[in-house]
Image: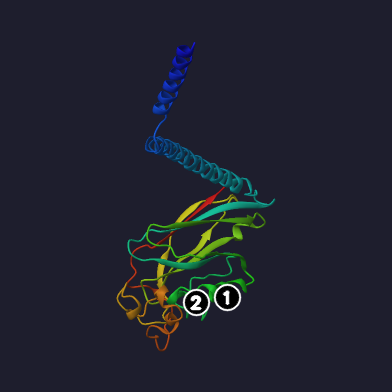
Amino acid sequence: MRTLLFSLAFLLLLGCVQEAAEEPTMEERLEALEERVGEVEERVEVVEECVEELEEDVEELEAEINESREEEVVAPPPKGTVRFLVTVENIHGTQTLSPGVFMVHRPLVSFNFIGRMAPAELEPLAEYGNYLPFKEYVEENADVVAVYTIDEPLAPGEKKTFTMDISTYRPRENYLSGIMMATGSNDGFALASNIALFDPGNGPKGSTTNALNYDAGTEENSPLLSGFEGGQPDPAMGEENIANGVATTPPRPVTFHTQLTGTIMKVTVTPE
């Protein structure tokens, strides 16, 4: 009996020793834990990549939704009007067009000043691209039906489109004219003048017009593209552009520009 008890005790002791031997050491436990951390980090990277892809998909979808909303809010032309799209394009190789003014007007008024002295309000536009005084000038004219502006310069190859809703009452009395400065000159400007918006049968008329280039006669000309030192506008100089350049004394009437011989501004009118 005693032998049996000793045998059982020995077996129990041997089992405890084996279990103790099978338990991992602290180093082994730390190594296993580090492996698990590495696996979790890899999974986190995968999840982050999925989140980035989802965010990109959401941004694209939001952009599509916004575009569709913008298209939806475009109202049809009011009753009794015709809608025109006017595209102004700079087709020159080197000259930049300043912001400018476009006006729909009756045939009794013309903004082609050739052979006449330029109005004082044209000088800021023709010399340094400030269209605001000229905009106010045309708005005060009773024969001007509507005024539109292009508020940003057009570099070579750039274009801008705006929309006009024109009344069909006495339609053949509606003409379009537009002025923008050639900023690589001293007082040169491109003018598209008296573009008919309706044909003889009173139907809306599409057209493409190459504007002509004029000299305002208010400032002496330097070589084209001679910059601020040549009296030509530089946006970085701010208000210093106002007094820059040599004034023509006395001012001369508006003439065709002898330096600006190539077409700069093209105006395309498209009825919708």
- Residue at the spot x=49%, y=76% of the render? 122
Q: Is 41 left, or right, of 132 in this rendering?
A: left
20 shown above or below 247: above
Name the residue nearer the viewer: 193 or 131: 131
Q: Which mark is residue 206?
A: none
Residue 114 visible to an observer of this rendering? no
Q: In which quarter of the image is residue 211?
A: bottom left
- Which color scheme did the rendering employ for the protein? rainbow
In the rendered image, residue 136, in percent from the top left (x then y), is placed at: 59, 74
Instruction: Assign a secondary structure to mark 2.
Output: helix
What distance separates the C-alpha of mark 1 from that of mark 2?
Answer: 9 Å
Q: Is residue 191 visible?
A: yes
> Toward the viewer: 268 or 240?
240
The residue where tag 1 is placed is: 137
Label 1 sits on what residue type? Answer: Tyr
Q: Is mark 1 on a helix, strand or loop?
A: helix
Q: In this view, does 36 lie above or below 199?
A: above
- The answer to whether marks 1 and 2 mark residues whose Cβ atoms lie closer than 8 Å is yes
Q: In this view, does 103 lie above or below 49?
A: below
- The extreme bottom residue here reads 249
Q: In x, y percent, where is residue 35? A: 39, 36
249 sits left or right of 140 in the view: left
Count every numbered label the image shows and give the total: 2
| Label 2 CA crowd tier, 10 Å (few <14, some 14–19, many 20+) | many
Find residue 122 and name its label: 2
Name which of mark 1 and mark 2 comes first in the sequence.
2
Tell me where residue 45 appears, x and y as whole percent.
Answer: 43, 40
Q: What residue type is labelled 2?
A: Leu
Residue that appears at 47% across and 74% down: 125
